[in-house]
Amino acid sequence: MKNTQYAVIGLGRFGSSLAKELVALGHEVLGVDKNANVADEMSACLTHTLVADTTDEEALRAIGIRNMDCVVVAIGDDIQASILTSILLKDLGVNRVVVKALSALHGKVLQRIGVDRVIYPERDMGVRVANQLVSPNLLDFIELSDEYAIAEISATGKLARHSLKELDTRAKYGCTIVAINREKETIVAPSAEEVLHEGDVMVIIGTNEQIDRFERSAN
Ligand code: ADP
């Protein structure tokens, strides 16, 4: 299978970290920045780096950006450059365009342009860290929508040595345990007879309220 080819435009803190992680995951990554020093600094970590101002349509064509499977726009403070770049990428026919938004309004404009995904890294990280601070057993939290989430909750003393049937989370709280991480093993779709071990991490799907009630009961 061919590796996915990514381009990351804007190699600031967010863009560079994302680009390096994509390389670590085994993908080819083209990094683009208008600042030559920034592009130069990243050249050792990425498959290719280029210096270009991506608000210039000709520059984008010259890069061959159309051939990328996915382009991430991680331009920081310059909202105008982010919007212009995103319009050009969609006009040029890039298959998947993912854009970092700085505000709700910026995100709204990006949706109107028709980008494929808008991400809000600061906002989402704030929500995640707040949830972890409030609930020590909550190891990770991914919002699926305004209502639904997936959470990782550790099986503390109170839950350990009980089977999923005994816990009966679906009937009592409405949320479902979809997987259990146990040391190096992952038990996907565990059966009702599965007994939790101390140190297990449960992966749970449900509404925010259901997850919250279950998490509290585990304390
Ligand atoms: P972060 O908050 O992630 O650190 P920054 O604002 O520091 O983001 O970085 C954004 C990067 O995007 C900078 O390196 C900047 O040079 C680059 N950038 C800004 N505008 C353009 C543009 N029009 N074309 C290409 N790169 C751009």
Image: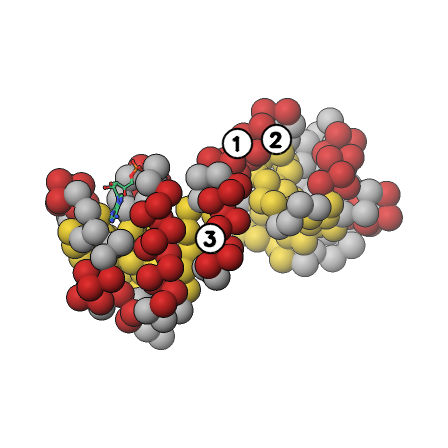
Q: Amino acid at mark 3?
A: Leu
Q: Is residue 177 left or right of residue 55?
A: right
On the image, numbered disc 3 is attached to which residue?
Answer: 110
On the image, numbered disc 1 is attached to which residue?
Answer: 126
* Disc with the residue nearer the chain's start (1 vs 2): 1
**Residue drawn at (13%, 44%) of the image:** 36
* Disc with the residue nearer the chain's start (3 vs 2): 3
* Furthest residue toward bottom: 1
Q: Is residue 45 left or right of residue 79?
A: left
Asked whether residue 103 is in view, the answer is yes
**Residue drawn at (74%, 50%) of the image:** 176
As displayed, is residue 124 above or below residue 189?
above
Q: Amino acid at mark 1?
A: Gly
On the image, numbered disc 2 is attached to which residue?
Answer: 131
For marks 1 and 3, give the one nearer the viewer.
Answer: 3
Which quadrant would residue 69 be assigned to in this image? bottom left
Q: CA distance from mark 1 to mark 2?
A: 9 Å
Q: Is residue 129 left or right of residue 52?
A: right
Q: Secondary structure at mark 1?
A: helix
Q: Which of the image's four quarters has the N terminus?
A: bottom left
CB of mark 1 within 8 Å of CB of mark 2?
A: no
Q: Residues within 10 Å of mark 3 (few under 14, many from 20)?
A: many
Disc 2 C-beta below 8 A from ligand 1: no
Q: Which mark is residue 9?
A: none
* Furthest residue toward right: 171
